[in-house]
Amino acid sequence: MQTAIPFYFMRGGTSRGPYMNQADLPSDRDQLAEVLCAAVGSGHPLNIDGIGGGNAVTTKVAILSASDDEWADIDYFFAQVSVEDKLVDFKPTCGNILTAVGPAAIEMGLLPAQDGVTNVNIRAVNTGARIMSRVQTPGGMVSYEGEAAIDGVPGTSAPIELNFMDVAGSSTGAFLPTGNLIDVVDGIEVTCMDVAMPMVMARAADFGLTGHETREELDANKDFFAKMEAIRIKAGALMGMGDCSQSVTPKFGIFAPHDEVGHITTRYFMPWSTHPTMAVTGSQCMASCALTPGTIAYDMMTAPNETPATIHLHHPMGVMDVVIDYDMTEDGFTHRSAGLIRTARKLAKGELFIPASIWQR
């Protein structure tokens, strides 16, 4: 006997995974974690007994429902399923998976599409963040065809505009959770910041890196990962996040200089492997760090003179552009919002099956 669960299989940005209706899943969090591990196939490096892809960017799950929030149309609950450890982290959110939330919600019938463009107000349940998504819906149907291209994804698709509101301090309650622009952990200067994603950020050079290493080169550098993980866990405690040894947050990022105005080289970690490109949430935090005077990254980038400022983050497969709206006053940097253009595609729909011994509807 197996239990069938309806799902849409979507690519969102540079990630992919199943998108499911909350009504089709158990409400108990522990049982939900077991269901998601079975669905993805966590416990095997290739996720051979599930629909995961053997990588942290392909073992993500979006759970959607109509929102009871006055502002939001859709509640988006995110789950990061581990590839091999049969663990599910419900603390973070994911901006790449968020990209396909608007299209998936329309496809699921959770809200009607307009003719032309449909605005979808999304509440990220994990962090409380609010995001406005603009989905291309000519004739009242989601369109996936278009000319927008993003690095890390082949071809082009219809653009999806994302505008992140009130994301400063969304997880920890503070833009600078430690109260400092720079902390020193294990002899390394770091900036701990919370903008869409709580992060610990450092200079690549302080680890003996150039910052231009490939994903494969970084993943093979076990000494670097061991040192980074020790710093991440200690910094997480300083940020008021408790024991983070079993959590994917805070995430870690490193910077290297770039010689163009508004450009900076970055690497982002998930955190136990290198992100193949750049996370949408992490991009907002790293761009904000580069713009904030006194951080480890500020002197590594020549900031644009205008606001909102477009920051170009160079990652292993190209560049991600982030538009940061902010104020700079005597009291320091104040984050307003961040905007990005991403793409998504519907890959499949139907039912996925898990053993009935894990859960029966």
Image: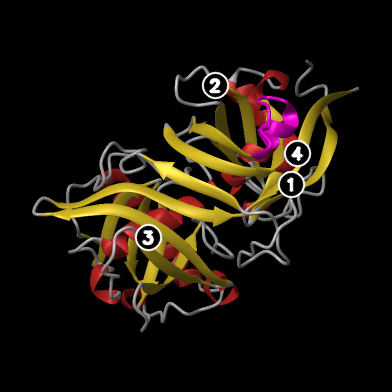
Label 3 amino acid? Met
Mark 1 and mark 2 in contact? Answer it, CB < 8 Å: no
Please give the residue where the numbered disc 3 appears in the rendered image: 286
Q: Which image quarter: residue 76?
A: top right
Residues shaded magenta: 104-116
Q: Farthest residue in the bottom direction?
A: 259
Q: Between disc 4 and disc 2, whose residue precedes?
A: 2
The quarter holding residue 142 reads top right
Figure quadrant of the C terminus: top right
Q: Is residue 242 visible?
A: no
Which residue is the site of mark 1? Answer: 143
**Which of the two discs, 3 and 1, sits closer to the camera?**
1
Q: CA distance from mark 3 to mark 1?
A: 31 Å
Residue located 76% across and 24% down the image = 358
Q: For the residue marked with disc 2, what is the amino acid?
A: Ser
Q: Which residue is mark 4?
A: 139
Residue 208: x %, y % from top left: 37, 80
Q: How many other residues sit within 10 Å of disc 1, few (<14), some (14-19) or many (≥20)?
A: many
Mark closer to the chain start, 3 or 2: 2
Q: Residues within 10 Å of mark 2 (few under 14, many from 20)?
A: some
**SS of the residue under disc 2:** loop
First in sequence: mark 4 vs mark 3: 4
The reply to whether residue 287 is in sight is yes
SS at mark 3 in the image? helix
Question: Tag 4's secondary structure?
Answer: helix
Q: CA distance from mark 4 to mark 2?
A: 25 Å
Per the image, the residue denoted by label 2 is 67
| Tag 1 secondary structure | loop
